[in-house]
């Protein structure tokens, strides 16, 4: 009985599956199992296998070259002791059963190891082991309504479930819509081939063990599917981790860019606002007119008009650029602060503070209004003064003309001959009366108006 070929199909399938599974791990130590029932008898390969999958030492000392039965039993007893310490339930299997090559008990021991370290470690939303593995399969195939997986036997016989799992995680590897449930052999062969070629997952089962088999061995299917979970679920986690890392890196880069942009632009903008607050100091509206020099007045008027042209050019060309810079700086500051808050970082200390820049900007807006108002008022005053001066000049011209006429009509020269008759005397007297009563009063008013204009408006 021991080590004999069993007529029960599941025994051969499990032997094949468990052997290939063990060899996928033992290859790391350059060890291999040829015959599962024979090669486990001395315990050496079991010790190596358990050390690899548990990442723990099995025993401080063990017999590395067992020849006698007692030496083999001692090694196996160390293995069973290790399994007991790690809460691995072993029922009705002892060291002697392994040394004797009891096929079903050897398979039972191997399944206990696989269940504990391969299937048992699977956990999906608090569901572990076989149920967790089945839950993962069902969730993975939610978008495949024609694939209904309810167990680890008949649900896999046509190979569609294997192909659907591959297509779910790597849709470019196969044309799922072209597959037919009636082509079980082709489907299983395709899935097993892709798993091994693309992902390095060993083909634990033969195609004939699954394809067309109304009830494949559940432990073998479960062992194989657990390898798919290990590959695909870890791949998803890797993708999530990579995505998370990429997001974190991108966020850190955005924060760094915002910091650099703010610290570069803010001092420049602050200095520009301060400079313009000084540059656009409103001119004195009367200082230039106190000299009383007529030509100086026109020079001042020309200067004020030139300043207005310069200010209008500034408003059209220079200021919009810095206004756009202010809006951009406000946006950068908002993104920087928000990114730090949303990613649980300390709120940055802005230097110079945005509030100080905003306050200086407001001050500049007020200064600009005052400057433009003062300049335009100055121009208006100059224009009014120009009109007054023109009026005064006109009055003075009239007065000068009248005085010239007076000098002609009433010369101070003693050579003027006196009147010789009454008619001439009467005419001269009438001229004097008109001069005193009319013209002197009128031109006195003219002179008074000129004097008043000079005193009050110039």
Image (cartoon, grey):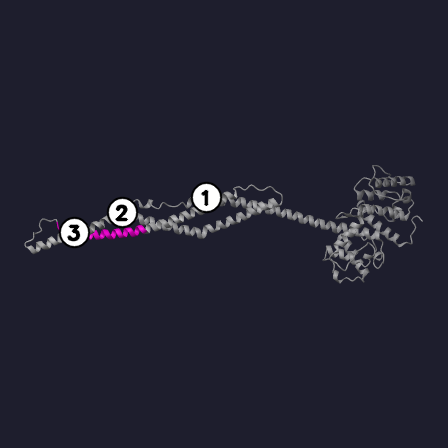
Image side of residue 239 versus residue 55, left or right: left
Q: Residue furthest top?
A: 60
Q: In the image, which disc is placed on residue 454?
A: 2
Inspect this view and state whether residue 20 appears: yes
Image side of residue 127 versus residue 438, left or right: right
Frontmost of labels 2 and 3 is 3
User: CA–CA distance between discs 1 and 3?
Assistant: 67 Å
Where residue 421 appears, x then y in whole percent?
A: 5, 55
Q: Residue furthest right?
A: 1
- Residue 397 covered by magenta stretch: yes
User: CA–CA distance between discs 1 and 2?
Assistant: 41 Å
Residue at which label 1 appears: 274
At numbered mark 3, what does the secondary structure look like: helix, strand or loop?
A: helix
Frontmost of labels 1 and 2 is 2
Q: Residue furthest front?
A: 437
In the depicted structure, whether residue 204 falls above or below residue 356: below
Extent of the magenta region: 384-411
Where residue 360 appears, x then y in whole percent?
A: 47, 44
């Amino acid at each position: 009985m021991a080590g004999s070929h069993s007529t029960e199909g599941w025994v051969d399938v499990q032997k094949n599956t468990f052997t290939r599974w063990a060899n996928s791990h033992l290859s790391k130590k350059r060890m291999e199992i040829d015959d599962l029932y024979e090669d486990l008898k001395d315990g050496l390969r079991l010790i190596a296998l358990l050390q690899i999958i548990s990442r723990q030492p099995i025993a401080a000392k063990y017999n590395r070259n067992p020849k006698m039965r007692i030496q083999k039993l001692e090694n196996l007893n160390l293995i069973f002791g290790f399994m007991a310490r790690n809460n691995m339930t072993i029922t009705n299997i002892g060291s002697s059963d392994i040394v004797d090559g009891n096929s079903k008990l050897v398979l039972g021991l191997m399944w206990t190891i696989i269940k504990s370290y391969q299937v048992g470690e699977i956990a999906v939303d608090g569901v572990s082991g076989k149920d967790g593995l089945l839950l993962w399969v069902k969730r993975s195939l939610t978008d495949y309504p024609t694939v209904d997986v309810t167990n680890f036997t008949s649900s896999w016989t046509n190979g569609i479930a294997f192909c659907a799992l591959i297509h779910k995680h790597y849709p470019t590897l196969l044309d799922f819509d072209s597959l037919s449930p009636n082509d079980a052999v082709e489907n299983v062969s395709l899935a097993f081939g892709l798993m091994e070629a693309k992902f390095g997952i060993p083909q634990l089962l033969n195609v004939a063990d699954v394809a067309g088999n109304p009830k494949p061995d559940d432990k073998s299917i479960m062992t194989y599917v657990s390898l798919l979970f290990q590959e695909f679920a870890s791949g998803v986690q890797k993708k999530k981790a990579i995505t998370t890392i990429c997001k974190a890196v991108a966020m850190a880069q955005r924060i760094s860019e915002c910091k650099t942009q703010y610290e570069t632009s803010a001092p420049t903008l602050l200095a520009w606002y301060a400079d313009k607050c000084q540059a656009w100091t409103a001119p004195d509206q009367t200082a230039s007119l106190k000299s009383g020099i007529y030509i100086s007045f026109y020079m001042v008027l020309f200067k004020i008009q030139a300043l207005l042209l310069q200010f209008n050019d500034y408003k059209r060309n220079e200021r919009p650029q810095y206004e756009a810079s202010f809006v951009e700086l406000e946006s950068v500051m908002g993104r920087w602060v928000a990114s730090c808050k949303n990613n649980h970082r300390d709120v940055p200390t802005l230097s110079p503070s945005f509030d100080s820049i905003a306050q200086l900007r407001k001050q500049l807006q007020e200064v600009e209004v005052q400057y433009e108002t003062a300049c335009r008022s100055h121009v208006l005053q100059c224009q009014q003064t120009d009109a007054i001066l023109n009026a005064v000049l006109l009055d003075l011209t009239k007065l000068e003309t009248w005085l010239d006429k007076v000098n002609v009509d009433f010369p101070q020269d003693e050579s003027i001959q006196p009147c010789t008759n009454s008619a001439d005397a009467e005419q001269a007297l009438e001229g004097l009366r008109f001069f005193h009563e009319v013209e002197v009063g009128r031109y006195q008013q003219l002179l008074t108006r000129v004097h008043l204009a000079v005193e009050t408006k110039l």
